[in-house]
Image: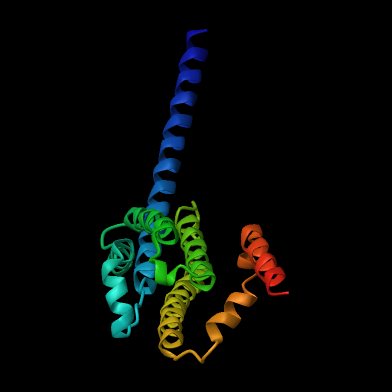
Amino acid sequence: MKIFRYIFLLVLFALFSCKNENQQIESEKVAQKNEAVFKNISKMWEFKFPTPRPEVAVTLDKWNEWRQFEIEMLQKPKSTLSAFQMKTKNLSKKADTLAITVPIEYNKPQILSRITTLNTKLKSLETFINLRVIPEERIAKLIPEINDEIVGLYKQWDEIIIKKAIPKEIGEDLMLQALDTSRNANTKGMKKMVEESNKMK
């Protein structure tokens, strides 16, 4: 009986040592893969912010959340893959605040739409980098798309400035007010207009 116990213990010991060796080999493979992934992502990680026109630059300088977002985007992690994971988490948080804090002159549907799209792409980047098996090809595709969204935002800001500089024609303000459906939906305003038109009769 004692012999069987010794044999059983030897078999158990052999199984545990094999399992430990396999785990060690597996963790070494994962570490090597992560190192390769880190190097590849590090090569791809390049975000570009266009030089804004002076009028846009004035507004962006006052918009603290945008400045913080830009600084965070331009700082590339240098140490490990987990540094990239942390970076994408921070970027995602900072992007969340952009739509809430957008300056009044840029609080327009086209700007908010661009910011939302940029935010969505950053959240996708965060998701991909935090997966157990990181899809490098998806990240390689996402980074240029994020750059395109940033450039698109700058173009939208330029467009707002250009449109603002165009002089209005005589009577254009009145025509725009007449076309403003939200203003026309104002019941008090409508009653006042009806009363005034009745008095004229």
Q: Position of residue 104 (x, y in %)?
A: 40, 67
Q: How is the image coloured?
A: rainbow
Query: Residue 58 lies in what quarter of the image?
Result: bottom left
In the rendered image, the vertical position of residue 161 relative to residue 187, given as above or below: below
Classify residue 60 as left or right of residue 147. left
View extreme (top): residue = 1
Q: Position of residue 86 (x, y in %)?
A: 35, 53
Q: Nearer the viewer, residue 16 or 94?
A: 94
Q: Which residue is drawn at 36% across and 74% down?
A: 47
Q: Where is residue 29 in the image (x, y as percent from the top left)?
A: 42, 53
In the rendered image, the vertical position of residue 136 relative to residue 133, given as above or below: below
Q: Which of 52 and 13 is in front in this view?
A: 52
Q: Residue at x 48, y 31 (%)?
A: 15
Q: Which residue is drawn at 73% across and 74% down?
A: 201
Q: Nearer the viewer, residue 188 or 113?
A: 188
Classify residue 40 as left or right of residue 133. left
- Total count of labels: 0
In the rendered image, the vertical position of residue 41 relative to residue 91, given as above or below: below
Q: Where is residue 20 in the image (x, y as percent from the top left)?
A: 41, 36
Q: Residue at x 26, y 71 (%)?
A: 61
